[in-house]
Amino acid sequence: MAVPTVAGNTASSDAGNTASSSARASASASAPVSASAVDLGPAAALSCRECGERFELGPLFACASCFGPLEVAYDLPTGSPEELRKRIEAGPDNIWRYAPLLPVPADVAEKPNINPGFTKLVKADNLARELGVTGGLYVKDDSGNPTHSFKDRVVAIAVEAARAFGFTTLSCSSTGNLAGAVGAAAARAGLRSCVFIPHDLEQGKVVMAAVYGGELVGIEGNYDDVNRFCSELIGDPLGEGWGFVNVNLRPYYGEGSKTLAYEICEQLGWRLPDQIVIPIASGSQLTKIDKGFQELIKLGLVEDRPYRIFGAQAEGCSPVSAAFKAGHDVVRPQKPNTIAKSLAIGNPADGPYVLDIARRTGGAVEDVNDEQVVDAIKLLARTEGIFGETAGGVTLGVTKKLIEAGVIDPTLTTVVLNTGDGLKTLDAVAATSQATATIKPSLDAFRTAGLASA
C-alpha cells in the first residue's frame, strides 16, 4: 500500500526528552479547554518525575522547571480494600473496571470507545515443561485487544484526555501498532486521525493503520526521526487542536499500561507475580506496570511482597540492555536494526527509569538476536497455540535466555507478556513456516509423502 512520505533527518531524538519549548508550545497552541473544566476522575494533577513540581491537568509532557517527564498524580480511593475489590469485579470486562484508578471520567464506560483490556492470562503448562519452569508460567496475551496489541489500552486513555481538552484530531508517532490503535479509536470516537510512521514498516501494520480511514503518513527515517517531526509539528500552528497521544497526551496515555498490572494481579487471585518479563520500546510500559503494582500495594488490594521485573530488548536495538550490563545510569542511543520493529526505538524516553526499576526489584534487562526472536515465536505457537508478533518473540526469547542463565528462578510464578498478534509480522516467520507437503488428492499420495504416521 502506498503511503504519503515526507523526508526526515537521521539524528536520534525522542519526544519524551524534547526541550521545554516544545512542551510550552503544545500547551499554548492546542489547549482549547481550561484546566478547571477538565473531568478526568481521580486524576488530581501532573507531577514531575524528577523534581516533583506539580502542574494543573493539561496537554503537557515536560516539566517547565527541569524538563523532566510529567506523570499523572491521583486522589486514589479511600476505604476498605474489600469494597474496592468488589467494585472492580462488578465492573465491565475491559479496562474501565479500573476507572477509579485511571485518569478518566466516572462515566467513561458509557462513551464510544474501543473498550480494550481484560485479555487472557494463559497458564502455559506446555511451555513451562519445555523451559523447565515448575513454579507456574503464564502468558499475558494482549493480542486479544480490538486492534490486536496492547496499544489499544494506552490509546483508550488518551482518547478521554483528548475529549477533555477539546482536541479534534488524534495523532501519534508510531512503529506500527500504535498507528492502528489510534486510527481505530479515533474512528469510534468520531475524531479525525493523522498518524506518522517510519516509511519501511511491515505491510500488515501499514494496512491495519490505513483501513480506518484516517491519514497515514510515512516519514523517511526511523522512529526517532518520526518522533522528532511530531514534536516540531506540535509546536507549530499546523498542530493546533491536535492531540498527540504519545507526546502532549503522553502522561495520560502511559497510564493505560497500568491496566496490565491490575489485570495480571486480579487474574492471579489478587496477588503479585514473583517475576514478570516485559518488552522494552520506549520503556513506558515497564515503568507503568511497576507503578500499577505499587498502587495496588498502597491500596491494600494485594499483599506487599517482593517481585522482580525483567526487561527484554532485541539485540539490534538494545540501548537499555547495553546500559544495564555496563552498569550505567545513562542510556546511549542506538540506530535500530532488527526485525522487531515495534521495539525499534533507539533513544527510549523511559530508559533510565527502566534501569532503576530492574535494579530496585532485583531484575535485569537482556536482549536476543533476530534468530532467537523467530525461534521464540515458533516455540510459543507450538507449545501454547499463541502466535505472537516479533515483540512477543523478544520477550519469550529473553525469558528462555535468562532461565538458562539462572537469572530467572524457574520455581517461582512467572508472567511473560505477548503484546501483539503474529499476523502483523508474518515476514518474520514466513520463510520457515510453509506447507509440509503438497500432494495430489489421493490416499496413495498421502502415504507416499510419509505423513500418515507422522
Image (cartoon, grey):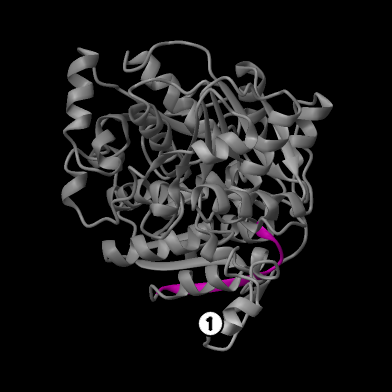
Closest to the observer, 324 or 410: 410
Residue corresponding to mark 1:
443
Residue placed at 70% from the left, 45% from the top? 347
Q: Nearer the viewer, residue 297 or 12?
A: 297
In the depicted view, which residue is nearer to us: 130 or 172?
A: 130
Q: Main secondary structure of the magenta part?
A: strand
| Residue drawn at the location 75% of the way across and 64% of the way down | 9
Residue 234 in sight in this render: yes
Looking at the picture, how far across and down is residue 132, in whole percent?
63, 30
Asked if residue 405 is positioned above or below residue 320 in the image, the reply reads: above
Quadrant where the N terminus sits is bottom right
Q: Position of residue 405 (x, y in %)?
A: 76, 27
Quadrant hosting residue 96: top left
Rendered residue at 45%/64% (across/down) = 180
Highlighted range, magenta: 214-223
In the depicted structure, whether residue 232 falls above or below residue 53:
below
